[in-house]
Amino acid sequence: VTYNATISACEKAGEWEKALELFSTMGHTKVELDKVTFSATISSCKEAGEWKVALQLFSIMVHDVVELDRITCSAIVSACEKMGEWKKAFEVLSLTMESEVALDTVAFNAALSVCEKAGEWEKALQMLSTMGHTKVELDAITFSAMVSSCAKAREWQKTLEIFAMMGLSDVESSVITYNAAISVCGKASKWQEALQLSSAMHESKVELNTITFNCLMSVCEKGEEW
């Protein structure tokens, strides 16, 4: 208990190296390392931007079969996002679900962001499906990451499907999300769909910007609708 309290104090003081030193001392002196120990040490490393160290600690935690908790797993998914480790993020999510740890929207959004940056749109769709099955709330960041992920892969049909889901969820779309969808429709020469999106922007009172107009002009030129 004394060690855990001291590590927590180091975490709050931003002393990640001291927290790591105490963690190491506990291991050498055979003091039990529990989920509180790991959580505080991992959080300390995360706050200091020491993502690689945080991932190493998580690997030890899993190896030693220490009980996982939401805060620790969320911190590790965030670490994966910062390091672009989409496979590790997916692995962490799988482990937490097997352990029946309830992750929140923030953790899933971090994982979706990793997939988007890595071009893993199919994995992102799997995560979105998991969020639905586990009743995790889908917010504007969730949909933005999904639209961006599918748009980058030029999956215009999936992009429009995500937009339809967003409407059913009563989540407001941003101009950035609309522009990504219009752009992918343009690249697929789907000018009618692009114009429908611009109409939806107007109805939703989302202000069109220069990027929107440029995308629409490009779409209409390809479709000879200018």
Image (tube, helix red, strand yellow):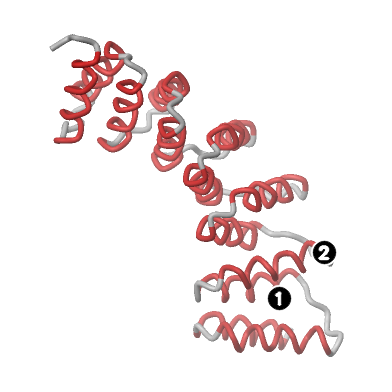
Query: Residue, x 68% and y 52% (percent of image)?
Result: 92
Say which mark, if any, is on residue 37: 1
Labels 1 and 2 touching (C-beta < 8 A): no
Furthest residue to the right?
30
Q: Position of residue 161 (x, y in %)?
A: 45, 20
Say which mark, if any, is on residue 130: none
Give left or right: position of 70 versus 211: right
Query: Residue, x 41% and y 22% (percent of image)?
Result: 156
Q: Position of residue 54 (x, y in %)?
A: 63, 69
Give left or right: position of 200 versus 50: left
Q: Secondary structure at mark 2?
A: helix
> In the rendered view of the protein, which quadrant contains the N terminus?
bottom right
Q: Amino acid at mark 1?
A: Thr
The CA span between labels 1 and 2 is 15 Å
Query: Residue, x 41% and y 27% (percent of image)?
Result: 166
Q: Secondary structure at mark 1?
A: helix
Query: Residue, x 50% and y 76% (percent of image)?
Result: 48
Say which mark, if any, is on residue 63: 2
Of 208 and 152, nearer the camera is 152
Question: With respect to residue 126, does 49 lie above or below?
Answer: below
Question: With respect to residue 148, does 11 lie above or below?
Answer: below
Q: Position of residue 55 (x, y in %)?
A: 65, 65
Circle count: 2
Q: Amino acid at mark 2?
A: His
Question: With respect to residue 90, does 17 lie above or below?
Answer: below
Of 18 and 99, nearer the camera is 18
> In the rendered view of the protein, which quadrant contains the C terminus?
top left
